[in-house]
Image (cartoon, helix red, strand yellow):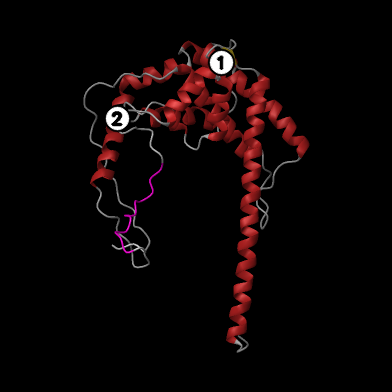
Amino acid sequence: GVGHDGGAATPQVAYAPPSLLDATGKQGGLFSDLSQLLEDNPMDWLRKLVVGLDDAAEALPAQPPGLADFVLNQIADYLDPHIDGDKQPLAPAALRALDKEGTMPERLKAKWDAGAGAEARAAAVAVAQAKANAPTPRRDVHGSQLRNNLPTPGPPTGPSPPFDVDEDVLAGVYIRHAVRKMNAVLCFGPHVPGVGRQPISAMAQQRHVKILAVSILEAVQRDFNHGKPLAIRGTQITTEALESVVQDHMNLLFSHHNDLNAALAIANKEGEEARKAERMRIWGHA
């Protein structure tokens, strides 16, 4: 094409989200920055992981394929039934039995080595190949993109690749999931028709932050260090540090909630003005 100045037009490049892989295909970029932050300031790293990172997979190794999804899904499957109220708190006997199975990293590694790793790798490879070979997305008569059915991955071949994940990173991902979901569930009241879920009161927020920090600290110590104090890169995790992280994420949720309310109010106003203009046109007053 030709540009406005008569020269060749600059080709438009489709937007793609930032990649964790550098030009050589090795993990770099944001992952490297996070890794350095973990070494320099573990608590700032934890805050970044919980509050400032959209995708927790960015903090996990990109290789072998399927590793990040496996870790995130296993932690969610473990925590969510308790967060959602589907499971009652574990009795002391159940906690002792769970402790005998090993720490969370040991349990994840055992499941990965038992075949879950090979399955995760096969699924990740199948999805990557399907995306690479996918034709131009089909669209229906209204222009909406039709969903392409990804092939079911074949049976895994070979043993599971090594499970090599930093235990401090696993603890951070565990804390991230607990904080973010518990805040989303508990920081807003019941749904009210026409109003939605409104933030809890200031007093309830203070109580929530303190209770949640204590609960998460107890859980992460139990699952990662047999109930003993836990440190990330030599820096001990304390209730005060967790309270700060919980508070920051809660404030972010409320800010996003206010932004959405403001956007909805603008859309409602514009819609009402458009309907008024249409009525005037129909009645011949345009």
**Residue 63 image position (x, y, % from top left):** 33, 26
Q: From the image, give the main secondary structure of the stretch colored magenta.
A: loop
Q: Residue furthest right?
A: 203
Task: Kindly identify which numbered label has been placed on residue 222.
Answer: 1
Instruction: Assess whether mark 1 and mark 2 are in contact (beta carbons under 8 angstroms).
Output: no
Q: CA distance from mark 2 to mark 1?
A: 29 Å
Q: Is residue 193 above or below residue 89?
A: below
How would you rate the neighbour count of disc 2 (Cα within 10 Å): few for under 14, some for 14-19, many for 20 or more? many
Q: Would you name the residue on which mark 2 appears?
A: 121
**Residue 130 image position (x, y, % from top left):** 26, 43
Question: Can I make out residue 90 in this image?
Answer: no
Residue 219 is covered by the magenta coloring: no
Using residue 25 as the reference point, say whether residue 268 is left or right of it: right
Q: Is residue 121 above or below residue 162?
A: below
Q: Is residue 193 above or below residue 20?
A: below
Q: Nearer the viewer, mark 2 or mark 1?
A: 2
Secondary structure of the residue carrying numbered label 2: helix
Task: Name the image quarter holding the N terminus.
Answer: bottom left
Circle nearer the N terminus (2, 1) = 2
